[in-house]
Image (spheres, grey):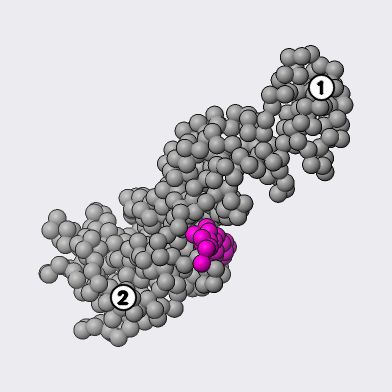
Amino acid sequence: MTDTDALYAVSPLDGRYGNRTERLSPYASEAALMRARVRVEVEYLIALADLEATPLELDLDEREELRGLYKHFAEEDARLIKKLETTGHEEFEATNHDVKAVEYFVRHRLPEGSDASAWIHFGLTSEDVNNLAHRLLVRDAVEEVLLPALYDVQDTLADMARAYRDLPMLARTHGQPATPTTFGKELAVYAARLGKATGQIRTATDDLSGKLGGASGTYAAHVAAYPDVDWQSFAADFVERLGLEFTELTTQVNPCDDLAALFDAFGRANSVLLDLDLDMWLYVSDRYLGQEAVAGETGSSTMPHKVNPIDFENSEGNLSKANSDLTFLGDYVTTSRLQRDLSDSTVKRNIGAAFAHCLIGYSKTAAGLEKVVPNEHVMREALESTPEIIGEAVQTILRREGQEDAYEQVKALTRGKDVTLDDFQELFADLDVDEDVREELAALTPAGYTGIAAGLVDDIEDIEN
């Protein structure tokens, strides 16, 4: 798409963000769907030739030429299929049917002298082709584009977690000062969560399934032609050779529970990143994180000083849109009126759009993480200005020493009050405890009260892409 085309694109996915989503074009475009359909039709034709029951024969050269139809699928091929659908071509009238146009395309491009024409799309319904084609595209889009983008974010989080494992930071629960943590440990939490989420996506991708059972899922046309062939075994073998699981029981429609599970898995991963985006935005707002300014970039049209967390905001918007679309898709594609209706056909064409919003979100989160730099002095100042956060440690140590009113003593000193470390020292001086315990209490500091946070970062070593 040229810059001029992008200016007039209906969707920002192909316009403003076209350079970020173009990696999905081989898997989400109309031409990609055509190519995948051609692949299914060609491989099905070859599978029929391998059946002893059929008189169809295809030699090695013919098979190679046929497979070249999808392996070397070009723009001119896509345009020919579209022409077959809309206006017709040579001996073919316009089909006004996208799958039938693919059938005619394969027939038109058969090797010279081939007698395979009658066997193209033999016994199939359009959904036999479509359900397989869509899943081949979805699988490849996930494996080649979306998961690598998620892995990049996950790896960045893991690297940052290790780099800042020892950097103490005031935590906030309910928005209020709470037991300190380290910045690295907090990033490790997200790396671990994202690792689990990507694992669920991989599992759901591996579980994508296909059907090849004909107009009502009964293999009726196949059995009518060749009643002695085990068509269910044939279908299972064919689907599995495409790298998909086989769905035994279907209507005309593959039930799509597998797609719904995949969409749900992406929604979970997106929710992890949405949570991360929000936290990064708040850390920037609190000045815990600074941002590297991009040369020439304008942060505000009126306030020249501003460096806004726009990448995290952009990611938030796109991932929210993606989750809305994924939820809709998951709900919609799992229902069908009786054995078949066509409403899901147009809906499935929007899978690519949902994936595109995911991809933009992932790239924007990655860009935001690359820009942020911890403000260590701000984090330490926040810790030093809230000495009351060692109160938890104080009352816990006193409980260990058998003081039943430990919690109440610290509560009376700190709750709703501005306190200093000197105030704590006065409390310690009045306590009836051994001197070594008094020294233990006196040594407490907000920056040092991080438990094993730094060591917890090592747990992300268990994450595998």
Q: For the point 27% across and 77% down, which residue is it?
A: 79
Of residue 246 and residue 416, the one placed in the foreground of this image is 416
Q: Which mark is residue 429?
A: 1
Magenta highlight range = 304-332
At 37% from the left edge and 76% from the top edge, which residue is drawn?
6
The magenta stretch spans residue 347: no
Residue at 60% over, 42% down: 379
- Judging depth in this view, the residue of 173 and 203 nearest the camera is 173
What residue does disc 2 label? 2
Q: Is residue 448 above or below residue 236?
A: above
Q: Amino acid at mark 2?
A: Thr
Can you say which quadrant of the picture contains the N terminus? Answer: bottom left
Residue at image point 15% right, 67% down? 111
Q: Position of residue 255 (x, y in %)?
A: 51, 59
Q: Type of residue at label 1?
A: Ala
Q: Distance from label 2 to label 1 (Cα)? A: 75 Å
Q: Is residue 125 visible?
A: no
Depth check, front residue: 158 or 441: 441
Compared with 138, 189 (above or below) is above
What is the x, y in percent for residue 338? 56, 68
> Relative to residue 372, is residue 227 drawn left or right?
left
Q: Nearer the viewer, residue 120 or 397?
A: 397
In the image: residue 118, left or right of residue 460: left
Mark 2 residue element? loop
Residue at disc 1, secondary structure? helix
What's the magenta bit mostly, secondary-structure-wise? helix
In the picture, residue 39 is in which quadrant?
Answer: bottom left
